[in-house]
Amino acid sequence: MDSFDVFKVSASALAAQRERMNVIASNMANAHSTRTGEGGPYRRRDVVFSAEMLGSNANGLEGVKVADVVTDTAPPKMIYDPGHPDADKNGFVAMPNVNVIEEMVNMMMASRAYEASVSAFNMSKSNYMKTLELLKA
Amino acid sequence: MTDGFTILDRLIKATNFRHQVISSNIANVDTPGYKAKDVKFDQILGSEMNLTVTNQRHLGGGESGTSSEITTEDAQSWVDKNTVELDMEVSKMTENAMLYQAGVSLLATKISMFKKALGG
């Protein structure tokens, strides 16, 4: 492993957490969307992370990547609202299976994980800068 | 005379390697099934310190920080079978970085001592 690959490890985590935040933002934005291109209400999406080997040297150091964005298969929430244009004949509207509170919690977790990777990145940087100062010693 | 350089080199290599392992753990804090890793530090440094004492010819050989020194931690597992504990990893990383920087500072001091001796 190249000694600078440690930056790639942290950067992969930043990219993955940012993608997760994008998906969460999309879930929250569509918490009340009853119409989608595929028909029916919006369905909550979630990211799947997987550990990814970085570099050719198989020494067990792993970055992270978004392996897949999956659609939550939970049934839509049925809300009684006969006045709604998308209400069925019994007056129920199929609302997205998004729980805004759950999304907020996920977003906080993503944000904390992002911050942790930023500090890891900064620490790597300050270590290397300190080493480069040896040239002035 | 230059033994100190070798020992500091080992220290810097080992701490740098551990830093990379901890970075991987932090990157995979939300990866399902990921097992936190660590480097058994005392073994690496301890065994290499012994080499410097018992046989001078061992100094140049042996590369510290290979996969055999990575250990998987047996911590409590979360629902998603991920064993990374973020706060522990961050504190380990800070501790490790301090050791690394101590090694680098010592090396800088040593270099400047040699320069002084050479009249530079």
Image (tube, coloured by chain):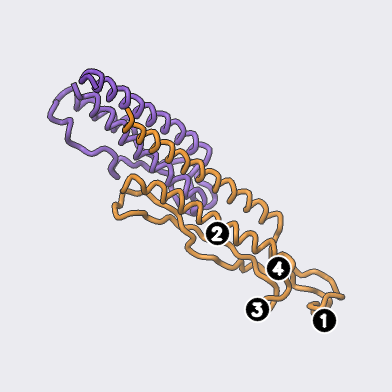
Chain colours: A orange, B purple
Residue B87 lies, in percent from the top left, at 53, 38
SS at mark 2?
helix
Q: Amino acid at mark 4?
A: Pro
The residue carrying mark 3 is: A37
Q: Amino acid at mark 1?
A: Lys
The chain ID associated with circle 4 is A
Q: Are marks 4 and 3 on the same chain?
A: yes
Nearest to N terminus: mark 4 or mark 2: 2
SS at mark 4?
loop
Location of residue A36 (image quadrant): bottom right
Q: Amino acid at mark 3?
A: Gly
Please report contact status of discs 4 and 2: CB closer than 8 Å, yes or no.
no
Identify the residue at image location x=38%, y=38%: A128
Nearest to N terminus: mark 2 or mark 1: 2
Residue A76 lies, in percent from the top left, at 70, 69
Location of residue A78 (image quadrant): bottom right
Please report contact status of discs 2 and 3: CB closer than 8 Å, yes or no.
no
The residue carrying mark 1 is: A89
Q: Is residue A46 left or right of residue A90?
A: left
- In the rendered image, the residue lying farthest to the bottom is A89
Spatial separation of the CA atoms under disc 4 and disc 2: 21 Å
Mark 4 or 3: the one toward you: 3
